[in-house]
Image (tube, grey):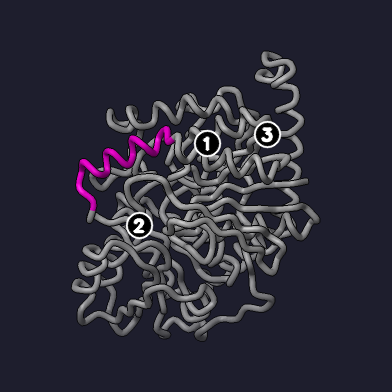
Amino acid sequence: MKIMLLSTLYPPDLVGGAEKSVALIARGLAARGHKVSVLALHNRLSSSETKDDDGVTVLRRPLRNIYWPFPASGRHGKLAKMVFHTMDSLNPLMAQTVRDVLQTRRPDIVLSNQMSCFSTLAWKSIYDAGIPTLHSFRDYYLLCPKSTMFRNGMPCKGQCVDCKVFAYPRKHMSQFVDGITAVSQYMVDRHVSHGLFQNALVLPPILSAVKTPINVSPRVAAQPAAVRHFGYIGRISPEKGIDLMLDCLVKQPKERWKLSIAGTGPDAYYKHLRDRCQGLPVEFLGYVPDTQFYTRVDVVVAPSLWDEPLPRTVLEAFGYGLTVISTARGGIPEVVIPGETGYLIEPSKPEEMSAAIVRTIENPLEGRLFGATGRRMVVQRTEAVVAADYEAAALRVMEYAARRRAYPRAAVSA
């Protein structure tokens, strides 16, 4: 098949785990013999086309909006942001960009992953070209301009008024999508419950591919007296719950723990954390390769306050057999199972986070047993396996799309 993936960013341009997941899918599909291309955006005025060592053709196009939004920051005023998001909902310039690429590449199916900056009007361009679309959710872009559904320190249970206004065109454009999946069942259910994708074939979630090392071993002896090395990796922003993690860590004697924080984020919040951690056994690594991070820590904390779709950090930590402490948000409870694969806590009850931290310090062997169980779960999620899952999903969507166009009512009820 000729398969095109749509992704706002693509490695080496990285903001979060979504870009890494898309790259693993593209590489896996190419290894299965498919002709794979990726359409992504970059902060340049010119277009480019490259073919990487894995046989994936990467097409990069300029963003046609009033500013480049990565990395996200507060440097743009409210009016500029309003104009950006208004254009981003139904951007005919970006839809034309997609249409031009489709005319030259003519894929058999498009796997859309991130629609931010492309605008959902691109879905209509794909539909009008007679090409099926399988969309995979990796954020809340279709429901919330900020893509997080997080406000005033809490996850949003529903849509606020301004979200409904910005999201209405996106909901309307979802009628042109033929099939949907996600990284977690939570994300599928959340979007369907808001009335999106009423014409689409709803498929089960596809857990992300994870690169796992062949052998893993503890970084420290499993002794109660040993210093526990905690780690956080990901975007450095308030909704990630880093302050919650620090609130609980500082209650423990400083000689019992240390913390590594890897990642980047808004300058103001990053400075807040650095100032707060003065005098504490905390190191800020900035951006570092995954291997360098996971081979130096014992416990990975994913303290999200927002409803994470399903963070790659948890799956990657499992891949290294590490102890995981995470919050019961979004799709996380689908893989972090209390007493089996990690410690799952309610972020509104910080005493649960404190208790989990104490337990990993005083009973490290238990945490490593959980990590070993998590590793057995994800070690099977190789590029080849996940690519096969997407291949099977693509074939189902192509069959469904053909029926949908020939017999609209019958296809919708299928």
In primary-sequence order, the first of circles 1 and 3 is: 1
Nearer the camera: disc 2 or disc 1 = 1
Say few, some or many: other residues with alpha carbon within 10 Å of mark 1 (under 14 / 14 to 19 / 20 or more).
many
Residue identifier under label 1: 122
Residue identifier under label 3: 131
The stretch of residues the image draws in magenta is 76-91
Say if residue 336 shows up in the picture: no
Identify the secondary structure beneath mark 2. helix
CA gap between label 2 and label 1 equals 30 Å
Q: Position of residue 359 (x, y in %)?
A: 41, 69
Q: Position of residue 227 (x, y in %)?
A: 39, 83
Establish if 338 lies above or below 261: above
Are circles 1 and 3 on residues that touch, CB within 8 Å? no
Instruction: Judge by depth and name the residue closer to the eye, 202 or 115.
Output: 115
Q: Residue at x 62, y 29 (%)?
A: 127
Q: Residue at x 80, y 56 (%)?
A: 33
Establish if 318 lies above or below 184: below
Q: Position of residue 242 (x, y in %)?
A: 31, 62
The magenta stretch spans residue 211:
no
Identify the secondary structure beneath mark 1. helix
CA gap between label 1 and label 3 equals 12 Å
Residue identifier under label 2: 240
In primary-sequence order, the first of circles 2 and 3 is: 3
- Residue extending furthest toward the front: 46
Q: Using the image, tell me which numbered label, if any, was put on residue 81.
A: none
